Each structure stands twice: as C-alpha cells, then as structure tokens.
Amino acid sequence: MDIKDVAIVVLAAGNARRFGSDKLMADLDGMPLGVRAAAQLAPLDAAAHIAVCQPEAPIAPHYLKLGYTIAENRHAERGLSGSLHLAVEAAAQTEAQGLLILLADMPFVELAHVAALIAGCDGEILASSDGKQSMPPAIFPRDSWSRLLKAEGDAGARHILLNASTRTAPEGSLRDIDTPDDLAASKAPPLGLDRST
C-alpha cells in the first residue's frame, strides 16, 4: 500500500491508571512520552494524521503542532475499543484505503518499521510482532474497518490481530510504558538516529 492511501491514527485517550499521573506528558529524554512515536510519523505524506485524545488533554496541543487532527474521545471509560471506533469514523471521512493504528505509549516504534508495514500491506491486515505475539502498530485495509467497529471493552483489536500476518519489529522497539518504573528504565535515542548506537 502507498503511504498516501493511509490514515495514521495515534490512540492517546487512555487513563493510565497504573502510571498514577498523566503518562503521555511524562518526560522521556526531553519530549513528552506520548509524542515521540507521533513525531516520527508526522513527516510521512499520509492521507491523514489523526490523534484520538480525551477532551482538553494536555497532550493534544503537541499533536496539533505536528499536524495531527484531534478526534475527541469523550467516553474513555469505555476502553480502547471506543478509541478504535473513533479512529475508524475519522479515517472514513478521508480517502484513505488503509488505517494504521499506533499506541501513544509505545515511544520506541521506528519509522522504518512503520514504512515496512505500510509497504507490506497487500489487502490483508498486517500487524507488528515482537517475536512472540502480534500487536500494534498494525495496518487495516478499508474493507476490514467494520471489524474494528465491533470491538468491545479494553481489549481493542487484540482478537483481530491474533490471526493477522505479522512483520517482526526491531528488538525492544515495541515496548510500552505502563508504570513509572518502565519509564525510569527507558532511554530514548534522538529521533531519526539508529537505535543500535
């Protein structure tokens, strides 16, 4: 699939209960944690860049500065599936033929991996893999969006990705940040630089 046919959506409306504070605004080497992955993808010439956030979320202005459109999730208590529904609804207003779903608390996702996912999507759902399980970021062709609208609760698209084709990501790049200890143990390389250095 061509990048110009893809709507990139960052899901950033979670309540971060385990973190104990506004996780996405936590500093990760000089940048809000929730902005790092979105910043990597902002330069891509996609059909749309969308961030799903709670109303008046402090992270939202950062996404706006990167050129993202905000889709407000006023019912975050409904879990990840509610954000997925909003992502589909926002993408459906564009000409996009694919929907790339990215989680805001996965700051180490690499641009090259996302580009490989998009290029490798040939009409079937394509997910990332850490070598053990399938997970976001994942790309969903337009004819699969109705399946996302059936997702319920906080499991999101997990059941859909179980049987999806996968592309293995670089080691460690699919880590998410759930707790202050996760953050303390994480060091992010400068954006755009090889993570092996």
Image (spheres, rainbow, N blue to C red):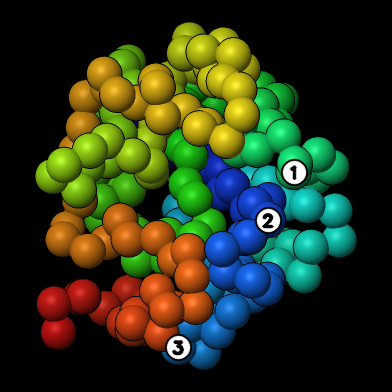
Image quadrant in which you'd find residue 173? bottom left
Label 2 sits on a secondary structure element that is loop
Tag of residue 132: none
**Tags 1 and 2 touching, CB below 8 Å:** yes
Q: Where does the image place residue 88, in percent across and percent down from the top left? A: 63, 26
Which residue is the site of mark 3? 29
Question: Relative to residue 59, is residue 141 drawn left or right?
Answer: left
For badge 2, the amino acid type reads Asn
Q: Earlier in the sequence, mark 1 or mark 2?
A: 2
Does any portion of residue 37 appear in the rendered image? no
Which residue is the site of mark 2? 15
Q: Earlier in the sequence, mark 1 or mark 3?
A: 3
Image quadrant in which you'd find residue 94? top right
Which residue is the site of mark 1? 76
Q: Residue at x 20, y 48 (%)?
A: 130
Q: Earlier in the sequence, mark 2 or mark 3?
A: 2
Image quadrant in which you'd find residue 31? bottom right
